[in-house]
Image (cartoon, coloured by chain):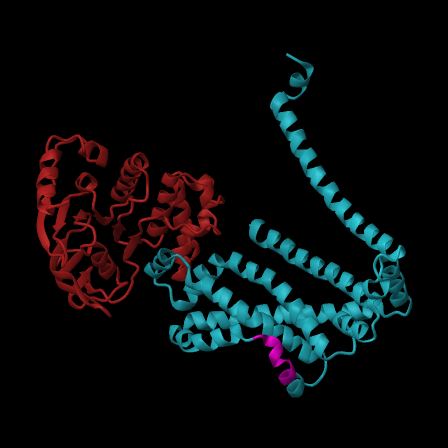
Amino acid sequence: MSRVQQKDIIISKDHRAYLRNLKLKRLAILLTQIFILIAFFALWEWAADKKIIDSFITSQPSRVLKTLRNLYNEGQLFTHIRVTCVETVIGFVLGTVFGTIIAIFLWLSEFLTKVLDPYLVVLNSLPKIALGPIFIVWIGAGPEAIVVMALAISLIVTIMEVLNGFLTVDEDKIKLVKTFGANKMQILTKVVIPYNFPTIINALKINVGLSWVGVIMGEFLVSKAGLGYLIVYGGQVFQLDLVMTSVLILSVAATLMYQVVVYLEKILVKGE
Amino acid sequence: MGYIVEIDRLFMKYHSQNGEIDALSDINLKIDKGEFISIIGPSGCGKSTLLSIMSGLLAQTSGDVFINGKKVSGTSFEVGYMLQKDELFDWRTILQNVMLGLEIRKMHTSENKKYVHELLKTYGLYDFKDKYPNQLSGGMRQRAALIRTLAAKPDILLLDEAFSALDYQTRLAVSEDIYTIIKKENKTAILVTHDISEGISMADRVVVLSNRPATIKNIHKIELTCNKRTPLCSREAPEFRGYFNTIWKELEVHV
């Protein structure tokens, strides 16, 4: 018996090698990912320096950093990030809450579901940006119109997603609670909602992305601040540095918000 | 008087866009307290419909069902229903699962909670009360489902193909287990099944239904010579084969 085996009885030598192999593979993937990121920015910087690409229209990492610093020194950086993030969070929360509530009402009334079905289909197919001018006229050219834009994009999808989940609950589970004399509200709270918890969380994940789309679209149409505003403004004055900087900030912010939802999912669904 | 269940000239018709289907036709049956009745019939003949009507989940077209002398109109405490699968909720612990019926009926008093704890202790699930259903074996899950039904203290248990989702060996063990519990708790039970052996092995009387629309073809009083009547022991009784053959012929299975 070798010393390795004596020290660690449960894990055999083969298994130890297998585990090490697995670890190495994971490390290789991570390193490659980091390498691609660095290589991308390095190549970009280098190509712009050597005038292979025109940094006036492609910008350049060093110029992005400079823009970032300027924005920060002017005290604007976090204002813009905050404005966009707040709008997104509000749109996201409203879309999820209202979407789920409407789905509950539709589930309670089969008649209502059937009546509203064609309207939902039309609203779902309609590109919501077409409603932008209407929102602006009705609500005014302010952050409210942007939030409504985000809401318009996520609401219908949430309703359809959640309602579909509600309608696919195992019939026998409903029959079981009916044998105990459950009313419709009890069926909803004891079976349908807990059964669909994963569906609702999934709708949240989709909604985060859709809310970002809605907010940026809204900011393109009307705004005086926010990342979408910076992108549009940068484009109009041909300041690609500003556009690229904003896009990069946006990708970081959107990823962070998505990760928060994934983390929530972990606690709420898998933690149970 | 004196019968716990009385079914009187029961008819059931289903309506759909493609027409109407006669499911039950003139069903008459009287059941004594403490009896174990098996209802055997070809698949799709309306066995489950009969149970649904008895439990008050479904309204009959005509005729009456009386339970403890009262007309059935909607679900009641007196009837417990067991479905094909255990239907335990994954998101609830075993204790929360067995409390479900009491919770829905708003009867989760401390007295009833104590009764549920007693049941869990008696039937060996007390140590598992804080576990989730997926941590239990198929047999234990079925037992938990039975305790969930018993928790509301029903007089009658309706078993709707209650064991057919289990593999054969588990099924034999579980039906033995459930039978013993039902007899110990002194409940009246009605089992619907298409398994002839299972029907005979558990029943005091076997009701044979015809093809749709279901009518009662025959009622067999099962009398077996065995020391202690349990499903497994019944299967070894000398009379078992005779009953099996008679019922098999009555079912007129054509392939």
Q: In this view, does B170 lie above or below A203?
A: above
Toward the front, the furthest residue is A52
Toward the top, the furthest residue is A1
Which quarter of the rendering shows the C terminus of chain B? top left
Residue depicted at x 83% and y 72%:
A238
Q: In this view of the protein, which residue sits in the foreground, B50 or B46?
A: B46
B46 relative to A260 in the view: left or right: left
Q: Which corner quadrant of the image does residue A247 belong to?
A: bottom right
> Of helix, strand and loop, which mostly describes the magenta segment?
helix
Q: In this view, does A18 lie above or below A167?
A: above
Residue depicted at x 11% and y 30%:
B238
x, y (%) of residue A30? Answer: 72, 42
Q: In this view of the protein, which residue sits in the foreground, B232 or A122?
A: A122
- Hue of chain A? cyan
Residue depicted at x 11% and y 58%:
B28
Q: In this view, does B94 lie above or below B51?
A: above
B27 relative to B16 in the view: left or right: left
Q: What stretch is highlighted in magenta?
A: A127-135
Q: Is residue B9 above or below residue B159?
A: below
Viewer can see residue A98: no
**Chain that is coloured red in the picture:** B
x, y (%) of residue A254? Answer: 70, 61
Residue depicted at x 67% and y 80%:
A145
x, y (%) of residue A172? Answer: 35, 56
